[in-house]
Image: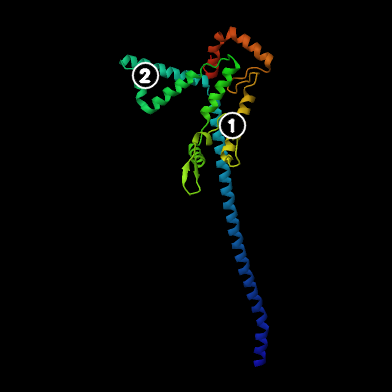
């Protein structure tokens, strides 16, 4: 009897082991499935975020393109006319109320800004005579302009002056030597330059910038008149441009109003 029980125990043990292994496999497969589902959810969330960012960027680009289109659609000449009309209307309203328009307009400015504006207008009036008379006048105007743009370093100048004019004697005393002959050169001086007189890198960079600016200006103002970038292009070559100018001298006064209506979109 005991032997029969032992054989039964031995016969049932492999089945139990097989059931346990199947359960373990199911548990491991379920954990793998859950991890796969989590990874898939994370990937879907990441994909949704990327799609949202792409949609936002697309909407922003469309908005910028629309704004740029609206800016190009606006006519600068029409805007200038609108500002002039508003200014004229404000003057008329001030006259009706018995007020001084210019005085009231200046109430919004400070005394310092008014002084700066007056100085700017004076300089502008001096530079208004841009007609060519002779090469000496052109050279003088260019020299004055370069002098006005020159910004000297007064602190470095004073330091060099003090270092040049002061000297130490054998007794150890610091005395001041002749400033006119040591610091400033005259016609009889033999001092042209010294080893210590080396410009700083900032001064060299400023000189390079100034020379590059002059070269760019010479290339810009050549003998041949360059086309203005803000002008409206209504020609295909120089010959067609001259023809359009001749036609415009006779017919612009008739077509100006029609052209303005077409640009505003109010033409019949």
Q: Which residue is mark 2?
A: 102
Q: What colour-coding does the image apply?
A: rainbow
| Image quarter hosting the N terminus | bottom right
Residue 263 appears in the picture as rendered: yes
The image quarter containing residue 73 is top right
Residue 1 visible in the current orientation: no
> How far across and how far down the image is residue 178, in percent?
49, 36
Q: Residue at x 55, y 26 (%)?
A: 72
Residue in front for this viewpoint, 167 or 1: 167
Farthest front residue?
171
Mark whose residue sits in front, 2 or 1? 1
Name the mark on residue 210: 1
Side of 22 where 265 appears, left or right: left
Q: Is residue 236 above or below residue 1?
A: above
Residue at x 43% of width, y 17% of height: 85
Extreme residue in the top direction: 250
Image position, residue 230 (x, y; %): 58, 22
Q: Are marks 2 and 1 in contact (CB under 8 Å)?
A: no
Kind of element beneath mark 1: helix
Disc 2 on helix, strand or loop? helix
Q: Which of disc 1 and disc 2 is earlier in sequence?
A: 2
Residue 41: x %, y % from top left: 58, 55
Give the x, y percent position of residue 39: 60, 58
> Left or right: where does residue 186 sit relative to residue 90?
right
Residue density around tag 1, few if under 14, some if 14–19, many if 20 or more, within 10 Å? some
Who's the residue at 66% across and 11% down the image? 243
């Amino acid at each position: 009897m005991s032997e029969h029980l032992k054989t039964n125990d031995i016969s049932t043990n492999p089945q139990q082991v097989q059931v346990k292994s199947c359960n373990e496999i199911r548990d491991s497969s379920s954990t793998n499935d859950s991890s796969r589902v989590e990874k898939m959810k994370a990937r879907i969330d990441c994909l949704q975020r990327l799609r949202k960012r792409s949609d936002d960027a697309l909407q922003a680009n469309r908005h910028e393109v629309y704004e740029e289109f609206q800016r190009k659609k606006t006519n600068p000449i029409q805007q200038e006319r609108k500002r002039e009309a508003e200014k004229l209307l404000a003057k008329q309203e001030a006259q009706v109320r018995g007020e001084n328009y210019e005085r009231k307009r200046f109430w919004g400015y400070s005394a310092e800004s008014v002084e700066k504006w007056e100085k700017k207008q004076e300089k502008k009036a001096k530079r208004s005579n841009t007609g060519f008379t002779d090469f000496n006048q052109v050279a003088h105007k260019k020299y004055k302009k370069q002098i006005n743009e020159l910004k000297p370093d007064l602190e470095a100048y004073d330091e060099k002056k003090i270092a040049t004019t002061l000297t130490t004697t054998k007794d150890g005393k610091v005395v001041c030597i002749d400033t006119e002959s040591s610091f400033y050169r005259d016609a009889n001086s033999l001092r042209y330059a010294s080893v210590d007189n080396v410009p700083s890198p900032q001064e060299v960079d400023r000189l390079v910038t100034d020379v590059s600016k002059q070269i760019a200006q010479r290339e810009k103002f050549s003998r041949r008149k360059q086309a203005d970038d803000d002008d409206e292009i209504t020609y295909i070559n120089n010959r067609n441009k001259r023809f359009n100018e001749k036609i415009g001298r006779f017919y612009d006064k008739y077509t100006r109003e029609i052209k303005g209506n077409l640009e505003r979109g109010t033409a019949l």
